[in-house]
Amino acid sequence: MYEHILLFSTTFMITLLVINLMIPVAHKIGLLDKPAGRKQHVGAVPLIGGISVYCGVALTLSWFGLPHDTHWYYLLCGGTIVVLGVFDDFFDLSVKLRLVVQAIIACVMMYGLKLYVGDLGDLFGHGHLTLGYIVGIPFTIIAVIAAINAFNMIDGIDGLAGSLSAVTFISVTLMMGVGGQLDYAVLPMVLVFALIPYLLFNLDLVGKGKGKIFMGDAGSMLIGLTVIWLLIIGTQSESASFRPVTALWIIAVPLMDMVAIMIRRVRKGQSPFMADREHLHHIFLRLGLNSRQALVAIATLASMLATIGVIGEYLMVPDGVMLLLFLAAFVVYSMTLQYIWRITRYIKRYKAKHRAKHR
């Protein structure tokens, strides 16, 4: 217990130190997010959250000794995705280039873990649905790319990517701890303690407005990679601690948001990777919530869905039932997005009538 407390507190302090060191560097080299177009924040904000979180995790694990050999591969893949993200923040790289590099990282990840998504669980009540190498390896590459971009897409308001990933990491830690994957359970909690300093600065809880930072593509992609890394270990290794269907629930909000938005864009004849203002957080903002209220609402929703997954895992609710419930939740989510303008107008009219009655 003492070693874990020291490990986590060290992660926090290193990340905090790196943030303070990187803020002036970011201003000097121009690693800044400047308000323009969809970006409506005030002033140029350093894009150093991802770099700082990675440094906190990497330095801490290296200093204390990696709890598992595969963590070397994690640091390699994580470092690569951070470099990719920094270049993307600087030069706005093409989608094709990003996808190619992400696919290569997925291949290195599979080699390092000696795992791929080959077991989807007992989804139909007739035994486990297994994938061979021919299907499983490309399926895993797609899953890695999807996870990386899901957290990249949802990183739209202060604290959102960090808060949603914290929900996922805590859920994974709980299930890995109960399931006996203790060596692996260290990594998600180290990430949580590396995210805390970032959230303090990102949410303007310290620095009095002068120390605000953003995650940047480096950070959101690192989070996505870490999430899928942990989910594959947790569901596909010999000592798997939870089922594949449970993984859907603990990343439900980023996954649903990404898929629903991409389907909507394709139907409109647009690129699925085109930026817009149709994500869940944009909808909450249009409903009249401020960014902090939207953050709390979405984080609460993510926590509720993750809790459903964890309870379903604990009670061993059949895989097929959990999948059907997840698909039902996704349909509700998608329909809500599809008719959000009508819903928004109805809510606004209701609020107006309610205010008129109380005048």
Image: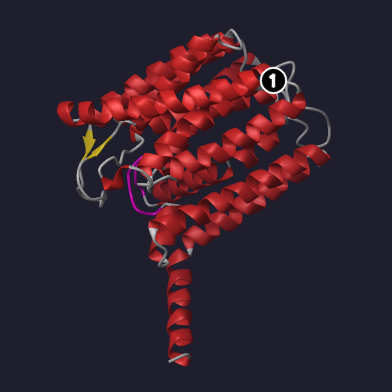
Residue 302 in the image, given as x and y percentages of width and height: 57, 48
Q: How is the image coloured?
A: secondary structure
Query: How many C-alpha atoms fall within 10 Å of the one at disc 1: few (<14), some, or many (≥20)?
Result: some
What range of the chain is rendered magenta? Answer: 269-278
In the picture shown, does residue 19 fall above or below 253?
A: above
- Quarter of the image that includes the N terminus: top right
Horizontal side, residue 126 vs residue 218: left or right: right
Residue 260 in the image, given as x and y percentages of width and height: 49, 49
Q: Is residue 277 magenta?
A: yes
In the picture shown, does residue 44 fall above or below 229?
A: below
Task: Name the quadrant containing residue 313.
Answer: top right
- Quarter of the image that includes the C terminus: bottom left
Callout 1: SS? helix
Residue 324 vs residue 292, the one in the foreground: 292
Q: Amino acid at mark 1?
A: Leu
Residue 189 vs residue 224, the one in the foreground: 189
Residue 171 in the image, given as x and y percentages of width and height: 64, 36
- Residue 100 visible here: no
Task: Name the quadrant containing residue 175.
Answer: top right
Q: Residue at x 65, y 30 (%)?
A: 173
Q: Residue at x 52, y 26 (%)?
A: 9
Residue 159 vs residue 24, the one in the foreground: 24
Considering every residue shown, the one lying at the far front of the view is 2
Query: What residue is pinned by disc 1?
Result: 182
Horizontal side, residue 25 vs residue 148: left or right: left
Residue 9 vs residue 219, the one in the foreground: 9
